[in-house]
Image (tube, rainbow, N blue to C red):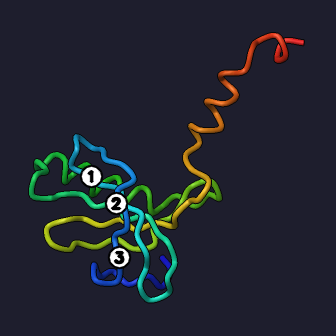
Amino acid sequence: MSSFLPEGWCYELLTVIGKGFEDLTTLNLARYKLTGEYVTARRINLEACSSEMVTFLQGKLHVSRLFKHPNIVPYQATFIADNELWVVTSFMTYGSCLQPASFYLTLPSDPICQ
C-alpha cells in the first residue's frame, strides 16, 4: 500500500460511478484531500451484509492483496468508517475494458475476415 491514509475524512466523494454487490456497494470518484489526487472509493454497507457476505469480502480482500501484476489495480487503502468498508484504489482515467472491447465487437465481419 502507498501513503494513502485509512481515514474517511481524507477523501472528498465527488460523484457516484456505479453500484454493485446486490446494491450494497457504491463506487465513487473521490479526491484524496492531502494531495488532490483522484481515486476510486468503493464503499460497502456492512450493516446490510449477511455474515456470509462479510466472510466473502474478507477472503476477496485478502486474496486480492496477494496479486502483483501490472494489469491489476492495487488497493491504496482499506478501512472501516461509519459502518462502511472502504476500498481505495487509483482512478483509471481510460474507463473500463468493456469500452474498447465493445468497439471491436461491433466492427463488421468483412474487414476482420479479409
Mark 3 and mark 2: span between their CA atoms? 13 Å
Q: Is residue 83 visible?
A: yes
Residue farthest along the bottom direction in this orientation: 34
Considering depth in this image, is 54 or 10 the residue closer to the camera? 10
Numbered label attached to residue 25: 1
User: Circle 2 sits in a helix, a strand or a loop, which is it?
Assistant: strand
Numbered label attached to residue 9: none
Estimate how packed mark 3 is, as few (under 14), some (14 to 19) or many (20 or more) residues with alpha carbons within 10 Å. Answer: some
Q: Is residue 61 visible?
A: no
The amino acid sitting under disc 2 is: Arg
Q: How many marks?
A: 3
Q: Indicate left or right for 78 with 103 as reference.
A: left
**Residue at label 2?**
42
Q: Earlier in the sequence, mark 1 or mark 2?
A: 1
- The residue drawn where x is 21% and y is 49% is 24
Q: Earlier in the sequence, mark 3 or mark 1?
A: 3
Decide: is 111 above or below 44: above
Considering depth in this image, is 61 or 11 the residue closer to the camera? 11
The amino acid sitting under disc 1 is: Thr
Residue 58 position in % (x across, y down) = 27, 57
Q: Indicate left or right for 95 with 57 as reference.
A: right
Residue 85 position in % (x across, y down) = 24, 65
* Residue contact between numbered discs 1 and 2, judged by CB atoms under 8 Å: yes
User: Circle 1 sits in a helix, a strand or a loop, which is it?
Assistant: strand
Mark 1 and mark 2: span between their CA atoms? 7 Å
Considering depth in this image, is 27 or 77 the residue closer to the camera? 27
